[in-house]
Image (cartoon, grey):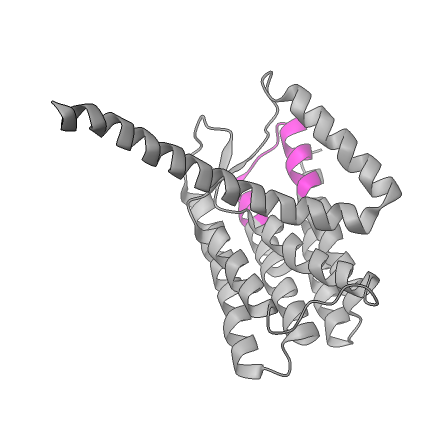
């Protein structure tokens, strides 16, 4: 049992490598799906490690290296070749920033001690990769109806990079009595969506997760600002 989590971590890494190979052959749709498979393997290795109570520093280091390849290098290489190959310098810079921010996000996660809060600080790198690969899959599946202008892609890549290294909090939804119902409901909705409309489900889930964290961050900031103003008003009237 102790080797099971590392097997799925290795499969994650292999999927990332295959995505790079497929991208180099201009098989962009298949390359995007390989990143999705890598995300699934990444989820499974964590779940299995917790279920079997098997964790090790070796496994954590291997997981980070696999994540950097599958969720940093592979999606950046995919986006560069699919959308930005005609803008070589700009494409190289923005995709390099994505890889760098992904590495920084992983490094920060590795040195941050566990907290009691059920949140991630910054967009997790698999979610960042999910934005780029589901964008590609969605656009290629619905090319006749949906086309993202190439000039918009650098801003999407840079925005995703910023979210990964930001201090914006994203729900981790770890298993607990408080989140049990929400977890089950979300998992059920996600599975139903995958059965009937997998491409749309993956696209809206990935983008919705990123936007939700950003939206809640703005809401909390605005609420805090109004509370500070309300607290200062009585002092001004004295």
Q: Nearer the viewer, residue 87 or 11?
A: 87
Farthest residue to the left: give it: 238
Residue 114 lies, in percent from the top left, at 44, 32
Q: Nearer the viewer, residue 145 or 193?
A: 145
Q: Can residue 59 be seen in the rendering of this structure?
A: no
| Left or right of residue 2, residue 165 in this image | left
Point out the stretch of residues depicted in magenta. 43-63
Q: Is residue 55 magenta?
A: yes
Please report the residue visible at 28 percent of the width from the left and 27 percent of the height from the top.
230
Majority SS type along the magenta span: helix
Indicate the quadrant where residue 84 lies: bottom right
Q: Can residue 184 be seen in the rendering of this structure?
A: yes
Please report the residue visible at 43 percent of the width from the left and 30 percent of the height from the top.
115
Indicate the quadrant where residue 88 lies: bottom right
Q: Is residue 161 magenta?
A: no
Say which quadrant the N terminus sits in: top right
Above or below, 224 relative to 15: above
| Left or right of residue 31, residue 153 in this image | left
Residue 238 lies, in percent from the top left, at 11, 22
Q: Nearer the viewer, residue 183 or 204?
A: 204
Above or below, 227 relative to 204: above
């Amino acid at each position: 049992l102790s080797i099971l989590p590392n097997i799925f971590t290795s499969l994650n890494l292999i999927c990332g490598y295959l995505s790079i190979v497929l991208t180099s052959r201009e098989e962009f749709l298949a390359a995007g799906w390989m990143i999705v498979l890598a995300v699934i393997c990444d989820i499974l290795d964590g779940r299995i490690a917790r279920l079997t109570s098997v964790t090790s520093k070796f496994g954590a280091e291997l997981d980070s290296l696999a994540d950097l390849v599958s969720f940093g290098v592979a999606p950046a290489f995919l986006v560069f070749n699919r959308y930005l190959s005609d803008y070589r310098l700009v494409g190289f810079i923005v995709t390099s920033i994505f890889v760098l921010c992904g590495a920084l996000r992983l490094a920060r996660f590795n040195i941050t001690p566990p907290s009691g809060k059920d949140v991630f600080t910054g967009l997790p790198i698999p979610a960042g990769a999910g934005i780029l690969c589901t964008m590609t899959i969605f656009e290629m599946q619905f090319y006749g109806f949906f086309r993202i202008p190439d000039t918009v892609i650098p801003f999407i890549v840079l925005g995703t990079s910023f979210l990964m290294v930001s201090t914006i909090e994203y729900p981790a939804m770890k298993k607990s009595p408080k989140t049990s119902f929400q977890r089950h409901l979300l998992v059920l909705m996600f599975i139903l969506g995958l059965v009937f409309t997998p491409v749309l489900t993956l696209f809206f889930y990935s983008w919705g997760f990123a936007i939700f964290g950003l939206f809640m961050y703005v809401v909390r900031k605005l609420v805090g600002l109004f509370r500070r103003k309300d607290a200062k008003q009585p002092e001004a009237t004295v």
